[in-house]
């Protein structure tokens, strides 16, 4: 059993940066992913990282502004978001991925952290 707890969200202004954290309780050697859910939309894949952190993947919509990383010694996966835009407003979730690759199927999910970007 794995539990995930996200943190780091908040109310920010356009152009600001944030670093979201996902603390992992339990053991897994699976890759991790970040997803987001904005009001009125479907859940959107954002980024993924392998267990060792050597391979990452980003959705086209966030390339260049988002950076995923992980620190296994701290059981934490991070998502840094630069130059935030109002359209980044969403609840951000981390998840344990079953396999690497689309459609990024996931086993375990956190409760999410809200990011709200004001213009």
Image (cartoon, helix red, strand yellow):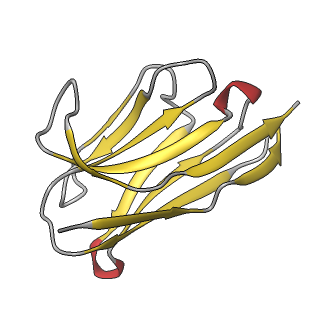
Q: Residue at x 78, y 46 (%)?
A: 16
Question: Nearest the camera: 93 or 13?
Answer: 93
Q: Is residue 34 left or right of residue 106?
A: right
Q: Residue at x 38, y 57 (%)?
A: 69
Q: Quadrant of residue 5?
A: bottom left
Q: Is residue 102 left or right of residue 35?
A: left
Q: How many marks?
A: 0
Is 68 placed above or below 103 here? below
Q: Is residue 106 left or right of residue 48?
A: left
Image quadrant where one finds the C terminus: top right
Is 50 placed above or below 82 here? below
* Residue 20 in picture, x, y percent from top left: 55, 57
Question: Nearest the camera: 84 or 9?
Answer: 9
* Residue 21 in picture, x, y percent from top left: 50, 63
View extreme (right): residue: 119
* Residue 108 in picture, x, y percent from top left: 26, 53
* Residue 78 in picture, x, y percent from top left: 45, 59
Image quadrant where one finds the N terminus: bottom left
Is 87 placed above or below 53 here? above
Q: Residue at x 18, y 58 (%)?
A: 51
Q: Residue at x 35, y 63 (%)?
A: 70
């Amino acid at each position: 059993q794995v539990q995930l707890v996200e943190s780091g969200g908040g109310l920010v202004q356009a152009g600001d940066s944030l670093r979201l954290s996902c603390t992992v309780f339990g053991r897994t050697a699976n890759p991790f992913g970040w997803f987001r859910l904005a009001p009125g939309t479907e859940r959107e894949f954002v980024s993924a990282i392998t267990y060792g952190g050597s391979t990452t993947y980003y959705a086209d919509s966030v390339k260049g502004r988002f950076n995923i990383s992980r620190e296994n010694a701290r059981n934490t996966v991070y998502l840094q978001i630069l130059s935030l835009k109002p359209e980044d407003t969403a609840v951000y979730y981390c998840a344990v991925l079953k396999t690497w690759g689309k459609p990024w199927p996931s086993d375990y999910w956190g409760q999410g952290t809200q990011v709200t970007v004001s213009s």
